[in-house]
Image (cartoon, helix red, strand yellow):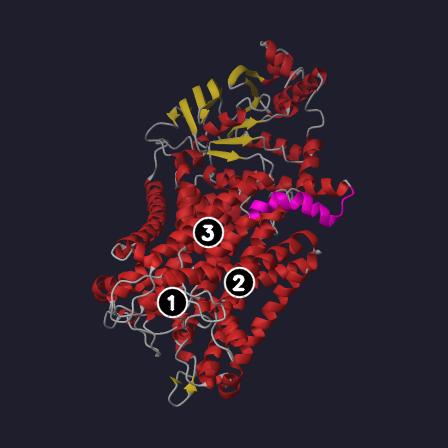
Amino acid sequence: MSTTAPDFNLRASGRVRRRQAVNRLSLLAASGSAVLAVAVLLLLIVSVIVKSAGALNLDFITQTPAAFGQTGGGIANALVGTGLLILVAMAMAVPIGVFAGIYTSEFARPGPSAIVRLVLDVLNGVPSIVIGIFIFGLLVVGHHQSGFAGSVALAIIMLPIIARSTQEVLALVPGTVKEAGLALGISRWRTFLAVVLPAAYGGIITATLLGVARVAGETAPLLFTSSIAPNTVTTNVSQALPSIPVTIFTYSESPNPEQHQQAWAAALVLIVFVLLISIVARLFAARARRRALGR
Amino acid sequence: MLAAGFCVVLVGLLAYKVFDQAGSAISTFGLGFLGNSTWNPVINKYGAADFIYGTAITTAISLALAAPLAIAIALYLTELAPRVLRTPIATLVEMLAAIPSVVIGLWGILVLGPFMQAHLEPWLHSVLGWIPLFDGDPSQVGLLSAILVLTIMVVPIVSAVTREIFVTCPPELKEGALALGATRWEMVRTVMLPYARSGIVGAVILGMGRAVGEAIAVTQVIGGTAGIHASLFGSGDTLASRIASQYQGATSNLQISSIAYLGAILLVIALIANLIARLIVSGVRRPRTGFAS
Amino acid sequence: MAPSDSTRTETEQSAAQPAVGAPSAAELRAAAQTDLGERRADARPAPLQTARGMEARDVLAWYGASQALKGISLPFAPNQVTALIGPSGCGKSTFVRCLNRMHEEIPGGRVEGQITLDGHDIYASDADPVTVRSKIGMVFQKPNPFPTKSIFDNVAAGLKLSGGKRVKRSDLRDRVESSLRGAGLWEEVKDRLSAPGMSLSGGQQQRLCIARAIAVEPEVVLMDEPCSALDPVATLRIEELIHELRQRYTIVIVTHNMQQAARVADSTAFMLSGELVEFAPTNKIFTDPDDERTEQYVTGKFG
């Protein structure tokens, strides 16, 4: 049947050419989408850099905000505040998150482990503004805003990230390593301390860094808990602490162009911080993976 | 053990506390709150209808924009990009997800907003003005700005999950399609998209959770007015952005309680979306049935 | 892959090649003689449909910098079964993938030399790879039905691509039926065409893939170790099927099972380290090879 066709050839027929055209168009669209995404990222970063150029100087990170009607000033108070908020949040979230991660991946039976995993996923999906309302109701109503309340809100956001990443890293530690420890007659817990933990050490640092990167820019949970803050450098966590994200938020809503410029500069500081932490976290993750797999 | 138990208790406490605060608004307005579009501190009457509308329309349109874009990016990263570029570009797209929402909002209000007013919205109006969505006066803030900002935030989430699933698509299936005389795009359509379908649905729902819950960036660009109108150029408010914008303005306990009620609605939506998405995505990641079965 | 499947595949594999390491020379000779002698003399009817032959001239192939094929020249006579044998890594799979331009889909994959289908160079600048692949079908090592598609849609997949929406539903049904009949699967699945392709057994899945490949009416069907994941009974059915397919198509089959080559092939090519050692009628390869290395391989002295 096919040999009877006199014009046998391997060139694309009209229909195949149309299919090829659709193919090229679709693939071009896919490439275009990727270009668009990268372009948006670059546009964002370039905007932040360009627009903050005038405001970024030593004063900006060493001075407190200028008094009303004056120019200059900086965000030293917010820098200190954000640092403190993150540190206090870490002090709460890291131990709980790491232990929850260890428990679910190493010690729990499948049933409870699945429940805790689910709960962590759920917690991870709760909008941060709702966490703000929760802490507002728990710690602010009847008292007043405080850095501590803000830190608790941030800690709740960090918690599932740290726990989940810890689980993932521990899952990478080969079962044979654990079995080797158990076979030596060492208890589960001792095996864990002696064998698993050192292998997963870098991963737990990664988990912490990822948590920090995530909460450093969080604004929503701080609005209800630690937003009405003084313009001075303070380390008193029982009072509301200023923070970089909230500063950016309030400046961005202000009509004052100078505050806009300060917001851009604060955004640059924030982005640099977050991206640096993310990159360091990636490096640690890669190293932890290599170690865990014994390469 | 203690830590894990703590996490479980924490989530319970969270839900309890949010609903507890919403209590007086719930008992005053009941479920009618959802359908009532008044938000008036002067007469102390509150309803969520406008914000539910704002949330629904911004989320729906931003997902409609983000999903195809994200799938296309995932496709580019798994099938088209030169090998050396794959990881760097994937990292860049993921970096987009790491940028704090307050910074995207800042950009949205100071860069995107003026551009929207001067160029994009007039153009959309002249081309598509016959559709009510694109009717109205261009402005710096409004639903459309919120939609674009949300799109930027959702794309990296959806594309990361989709890419993970595309990568696991068995090469023998892709070869099977090519050997049958499929073009690359036809291979994607006949093999990869069906293979990844439920995972993509899960990813989009995950993105939806993000879009519904995003408060800050939306507050910055949406304009913050109640009201239901078809035009995307006009301002509006979502559940999350209304909560955020009221943080210092609450004058009565009932208003605070109503804000918590908005939060409770948000919590319920987010929980449902998340559970569904996790179920679907984890179902996909479970080992698939083998070829010999 | 689910654990139960992988274990099953393993047992199938080990069962399928009980003596792959060292078939005795006598066994092979017997296999070659009975199958080729008797079957060919008595049971080989004239082709129902004349297919086109292929020819490879001095084919070179690379994966990145490493060369996999070092100049292979082979004819594939129309309506004949040609087997490619050789130890793992000898390049037989690479070669068969060059025959329908699938090798270039692998990152770093590169091909040189000339391969013709009925005199038309498939690597010519105006030759379209999509068209080439629709004329030269392929069946893979592992059955790979499209997991989300039904039995019917699996077979119809290629047709829908090439015919688009213009294919009439009734024509599609006819072609699916004839393809499933051609693959010896129709009787087993005619009552459940809408069941998922993955619901079939491994051997049935492989015949489904054969049906899918012949549904687009190719000239040549390439088979890359099509039975290596199947049990002996399923293997036998595929081998019988190959005898029938030869009446309509030119067949090239890669196999590491020498008895299989002896049973199904008219001609056999023995490859070693990317080179063609010997090509001859199957009978001769297994009973009286010219090259010492071929002799050693077919008698199980190495490989």
The kind of residue on which mark 3 rests is Ala
Q: In which quarter of the view is residue C15 placed? A: top right
Residue under numbered circle 3: B160
Query: In the structure shown, which secondary structural element does the residue marked by tag 2 occupy?
Result: helix
User: Can see residue A148?
Assistant: yes
Q: Quadrant of the N terminus of chain B?
A: bottom right
Q: Which residues are magenta?
A: A185-203
Q: Mark 3 falls within which chain?
A: B
- The quadrant of the image that shows the C terminus of chain B is top right
Q: How many marks?
A: 3
Residues indicated by labels 3 and 1 sit on the same polypeptide chain: no
As measured in the structure, the alpha-carbon distance from the residue carrying label 1 to the one carrying label 2 is: 24 Å
Residue shown at 43%/79% (left/top)?
A: B48
Point out the frontmost of discs 3 and 1: 1
What mark, if any, has residue A155 been given in the picture?
Answer: 2
Q: Position of residue B189 (x, y in %)?
A: 44, 49
The answer to which of marks 1 and 2 sits earlier in the sequence is 2
Q: Position of residue C272 (x, y in %)?
A: 55, 18
Q: Is residue B86 above or below residue C104?
A: below
The residue under the point 73% across, 48% down is: A188
Left or right? Give the position of B42 relative to A194: left
Q: Nearer the viewer, residue A148 or A257?
A: A148
Front residue of A175/A228: it is A228
Q: Residue at x 58, y 61 (%)?
A: A120
